[in-house]
Amino acid sequence: MSIEQYQETFIQTNFADRIGGANYGKDTAIYKFEKIKRAKASAKQDFPNIELIDMGVGEPDEMADEGIVARLAIEAAKEENRGYSDNGIPEFKAAAAAYLKDVFRVEGIDPVNEVVHSIGSKPALAMLPSCFINPGDITIMTVPGYPVLGTHTKYLGGQVYTVELKRENNFLPDLNSIPEDIARKAKLLYLNYPNNPTGASATPEFFSAVVDWAKKYNVVVIHDAPYAALTYDGVKPLSFLSVPGAKDVGVELHSLSKSYNMTGWRIGFVAGNPLVVKAFSDVKDNNDSGQFIAIQKAAAYGLEHPEITEAIAAKYSRRHNMLVDALNSLGFKAEKPKGSFFLYVAAPKGVKGGRRFESGEDFSQFLIREKLISTVPWDDAGPFVRFSVTFIAKGEEDEKRVISEIQRRLSDVEFEF
């Protein structure tokens, strides 16, 4: 039977309201990433002999370091690593605590009670609301932003209040704009720096203000930091936990996906407030049985070698420099971020003497369908598009070729801003 035929059976009426209830699957709206997927397919069909340059992908373009892969192979062959790991092995927790100290200057993290591994950051974000959210409770999120914590807040009957990230505030949320009644009712505040999609970085002063705000309103801070070690031009990696008082109000989530090219390995950790870590560990224990021990041991090796991330960051920094220069030569006002592999730029208003762009999505569709350059649009807080420097290129010369090709394809039109 087809999906449509099954929609006429009792299965259709049994779906939970949180995913659409009896109307699940019948929504005809096409979401952003599906539109991108369709536009890419159409462009490839219309121009089969032209390379589609994918600047929208949000994951590394290379494999994990050879040392990490070798350690996995060694550990995977050991009989003692075959079983469940539950809430993690001591070696990984110790490596995570040492990593926070060595790379981020975070002192005093107890690996036993203040660190727990996660099968990547996404599942951790999905589980954390179960530790805190009752029906009617509020999670404060930023837009644009990564929605998982908010989605699961709603699944649990909670509410989401959003704060816009604006250029005039360096893409940091204005905590003072949050109404008093919302702040006092909120349970969770979600932050993500360096930020996806804006590429913005936080400052110690901002994090200190977050700690003061969280203490004033009794709100738990969840800082999602998968890009925290990817910083450029002499900027030192910054952890929320390095700020005095941060451990009193929240936790930080780290992932090896972006900083170690280990996206598919699904390994990260939650660190910080021991009570939050304990609660997350209990919820996690009822959701999974832990990541494969060999992967944890290979990840521990990676955390002990931060120079791996430094080399990755050098590559992204080089690519950012070239991309920023190319876009600005075409009239954009792109600014190199201090961290992450994302470049967030305001969409033009149109092409001189030609079509207009009413949104970032309009411009993104133009880039894909007419220039075979894929980006991701963000219109939550103004018309922007996100470029990613994780595009496929084999070496510096190939990087230069890709960026030069982008510049060439866009140079036959004059954009209006």
Image: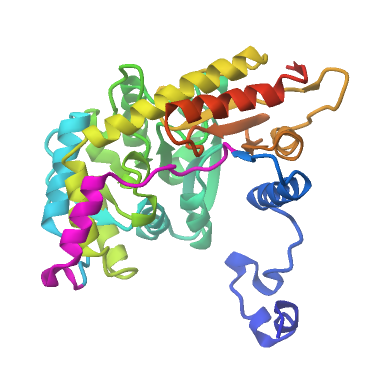
Among the 4 quarters of the image, the one containing residue 96:
top left
Q: Which residue is painted at 42% across and 37% down in the image?
A: 192
Q: Is residue 64 magenta?
A: yes
Q: Position of residue 328 (x, y in %)?
A: 61, 14
Residue occupying the far right of the picture? 353
Q: Is residue 63 above or below residue 293?
A: above
State the image quarter where residue 349 is shown: top right
Q: Nearer the viewer, residue 89 or 150?
A: 89
Asked whether residue 208 is drawn in magenta, I would say no
Quadrant where the C terminus is found in the figure: top right
Residue 316 in the image: above or below residue 247? above
Q: Is residue 212 left or right of residue 16?
A: left
Q: Is residue 9 above or below residue 375?
A: below
Judge left or right: residue 105 versus residue 208.
Answer: left
Q: Quadrant of residue 217?
A: top left
The residue lying at 78 percent from left, 20 percent from top is 413
Residue stretch in magenta: 54-83
Above or below, 295 against 185 in this view is below
Please name whichever residue, 217 or 144, is drawn nearer the observer in this view of the structure: 144
User: So how many labels did they put on this image?
Assistant: 0
Residue occupying the point 74% across, 56% down:
29
Is residue 194 shown to the viewer in this render? yes
Left or right of 139 in this view: 5: right
Q: Does residue 113 show up?
A: no
Picture coordinates of residue 255 (x, y %)? 32, 46
Q: Position of residue 119 (x, y in %)?
A: 32, 58
Tell me the colour scheme of the image.
rainbow
Residue nearer the viewer, 251 or 293: 293
Q: Residue at x 53, y 57 (%)?
A: 154
Q: Quadrant of the N terminus?
A: bottom right
